[in-house]
Amino acid sequence: MTDRIRTDLASEAYTRLGDEASALEGAALRQETLFGLPLLSLTVTSESAAARLGKPAGRYYTLSLPAHPRRAEDGFEGLARAAAALIRRCGVPEGGGVLVAALGNPDITPDALGPLCASQLLVTRHLKQQDETAWRAFAPVSLIRPGVLGTSGVESAEQIRALCRCVRPELVIVVDALAGAEAAALCRSLQVCDSGISPGAGVCNDRARIDRAYLGVPVTAVGVPTVTDAAPGLFVTPRDIDSAVRECARVVAYGINLALHPGLTLGDIDALVG
């Protein structure tokens, strides 16, 4: 990664190259608007560009979020539908099974995005197996909360791969908290990509990479930056991280629900997740 700046956001890695970025072959950044929200779309197609950016080849979408995207506010539906649209851009199987992997440590607030998201996901695989007709409007979705290596003794990637062999999903969606380079982007950006994820890479705690090569199925990674590097061994997070990570987790969860069950409304999801 350029200048060894630690960030999980591909758009930050690209823009920090400055003038060099425009001459980088195999990487193209495009600005657009999605549901009224600013969106940066980065496509990395060459190994040289991937090496310079420190990111694998793939499609990366960075959506700008407003501060405190509360469910009760009118703009929440646009946020959730934008997240859903980006997940669908990365590819969603029509009628096929999806495994959602909610990474992170629920006891450490900046790392709790995945677990908080998991509590608001519609898990339907077992229901469809019991009564396909009654649940025909839903995709078969299963969920794993692998925790962290320190509490389970097993790498998240290993747990996910083992479960993939059992449930045989056509897609894995991984949700995890990220590290960013810019403090202003913390809990204000949502990244969706089709290249997988290296848990802990942004905070110098790289774990086994979770991607198509390892799992044997496509992997879409969804994350929000919650910490930034302040000094060697020191990371900072917003002072309102407790509420901010909960609000972001709800956006991610509703986005996944809408992407996988497109016939639902936000009201339907409210009723189903309580």
Image (cartoon, helix red, strand yellow):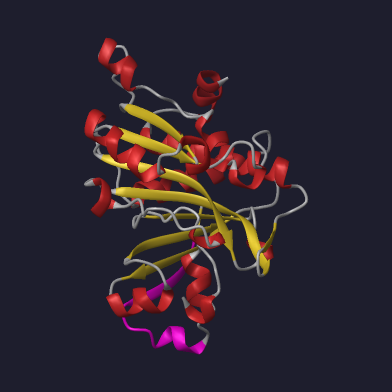
Q: In this view, does 137 lie to the left or right of 108?
A: left
Residue at figure coordinates x 35%, y 50% from the top left: 210
Verify whether residue 28 appears in magenta: yes
- Residue 157, x across and y down, in percent: 36, 45
Q: Nearer the viewer, residue 216 or 122?
A: 216
For the C terminus, give its image quadrant.
top right
Residue at figure coordinates x 29%, y 72% from the top left: 45
The count of marks equals: 0
Q: Can residue 153 be seen in this view?
A: yes
Question: Which quadrant of the structure image shows residue 133?
Answer: top left
Position of residue 15 relative to residue 154, above or below, is below
Position of residue 137 relative to residue 184, above or below, is above
- Residue 208, x across and y down, in percent: 38, 53
Position of residue 216 relative to residue 9, above or below, is above
Numbered range of the magenta stretch: 19-33
Residue at figure coordinates x 55%, y 46% from the top left: 79
- Toward the right, the furthest residue is 239
- Residue 17, x across and y down, in percent: 50, 82
Q: Is residue 131 visible?
A: no
Verify whether residue 177 appears in magenta: no
- Residue 225, x across and y down, in percent: 58, 56
Q: In this view, does 52 lie to the left or right of 249?
A: left
